[in-house]
């Protein structure tokens, strides 16, 4: 069993749990993910690792309450245990040779962008982090991000934190002001990552995105997480989740991400009856 040693509510629909998982913590690297089950009958839920502590033997995940399974997960508190957790899965991010990087987080994607920024910062890389949220009440882990980068820009769509605009507008402003990025890392909703890639293609800046499609086994067997990259089929669980954003077919990924919306809504309704 995997004990929850810390739980924090980050905003009304997003929570953080730190879980005792020493074997996973020992090997985890930014970019990798775990799959957990809340109980014996629970579905397998993949989460990108938001943080890990090798000394304490813990792994942190940050999740949004979007359906029945994440509602059940959110019902657990400190001292409760998860049925199981496997990982670390996927390929760790590779940041060799970069000197200046823009790390972009969109909404919950900020939780996944954070370990990337932290790793780069610890390698001595200059990191500009740009995080975007719909409004100030949805901002998460701002202090952690501030400590994990050189400059932090927190944007809101409605300007309620005094900093209005999309992450793409801020990134373009920084590029036009003379910032020379070797790499952009963009993590968040598919439409946001697509918009970042359209922008960076224009300026010829290499861009890595983290793909989070539907996953089932997480080991390359079921094909559920397939996406098209550079005209080839790739499995996000074993070939990614990081991919060259300029090669990802975002339109097909967006269409595929909407395939099970009705079933998800039905499952949520059934759980609330
Ligand atoms: Fe089954 Fe990736 S989740 S192949």
Image: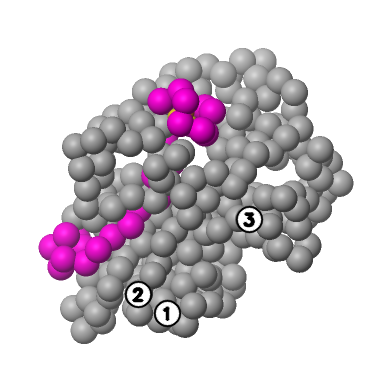
Residue for badge 2: 98
Residue for badge 1: 125
Q: Earlier in the sequence, mark 2 or mark 3?
A: 3
Q: Image height check: is 138 above or below 116?
A: above
Quadrant containing the C terminus is: top right
* Mark 2 and mark 1 residues within 8 Å of each other at the beta carbon: yes
**Segment tinted magenta in the rendering:** 199-223
Position of 151 compared to 9: left or right?
left
Q: Image height check: is 167 above or below 84?
A: below
Nearer the observer, 135 or 177: 177
Was residue 221 drawn as part of the magenta stretch in this picture?
Answer: yes
Q: CA distance from mark 2 to mark 1?
A: 7 Å
Was residue 128 drawn as part of the magenta stretch in this picture?
Answer: no
Q: Residue at x 30, y 68 (%)?
A: 183
Q: Is residue 103 visible?
A: yes
Q: Image height check: is 194 above or below 159?
A: above
Residue for badge 3: 27
Secondary element type, mark 3: helix
Q: CA distance from mark 2 to mark 3?
A: 23 Å
**Residue 143 on image: x %, y %:** 59, 73
Label 2 packing within 10 angstroms: few (<14), some (14-19), many (20+): some
Q: Earlier in the sequence, mark 3 or mark 1?
A: 3
């Amino acid at each position: 069993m995997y004990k929850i040693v810390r739980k924090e509510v980050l905003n009304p629909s997003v929570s953080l749990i730190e879980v005792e998982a020493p074997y996973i913590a020992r090997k985890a690297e930014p970019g990798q993910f775990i799959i957990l089950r809340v109980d014996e009958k629970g579905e397998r839920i993949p989460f990108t690792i938001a943080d890990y502590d090798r000394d304490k033997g813990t792994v942190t995940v940050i999740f949004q309450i979007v359906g029945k399974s994440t509602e059940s997960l959110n019902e657990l508190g400190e001292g409760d245990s998860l049925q199981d957790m496997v990982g670390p899965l996927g390929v760790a991010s590779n940041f060799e040779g970069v000197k200046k990087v823009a790390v972009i987080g969109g909404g919950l994607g900020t939780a996944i962008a954070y370990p990337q920024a932290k790793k780069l910062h610890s390698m001595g890389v200059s990191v500009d982090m740009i995080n975007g949220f719909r409004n100030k009440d949805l901002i998460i882990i701002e202090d952690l991000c501030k400590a994990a980068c050189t400059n932090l820009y927190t944007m809101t769509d409605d300007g309620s934190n005094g900093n209005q605009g999309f992450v793409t507008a801020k990134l373009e402003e920084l590029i036009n002001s003379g910032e020379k990025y070797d790499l952009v890392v963009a993590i968040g909703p598919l439409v946001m990552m697509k918009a970042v890639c359209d922008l960076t293609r224009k300026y010829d800046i290499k861009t890595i995105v983290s793909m989070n499609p539907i996953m089932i086994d997480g080991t390359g067997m079921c094909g559920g997480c397939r996406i098209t990259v550079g005209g080839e089929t790739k499995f996000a669980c074993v070939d990614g989740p990081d991919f060259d954003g300029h090669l990802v077919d975002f339109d097909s990924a967006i269409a595929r991400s909407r395939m099970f919306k009705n079933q998800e809504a039905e499952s949520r309704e059934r759980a609330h009856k």
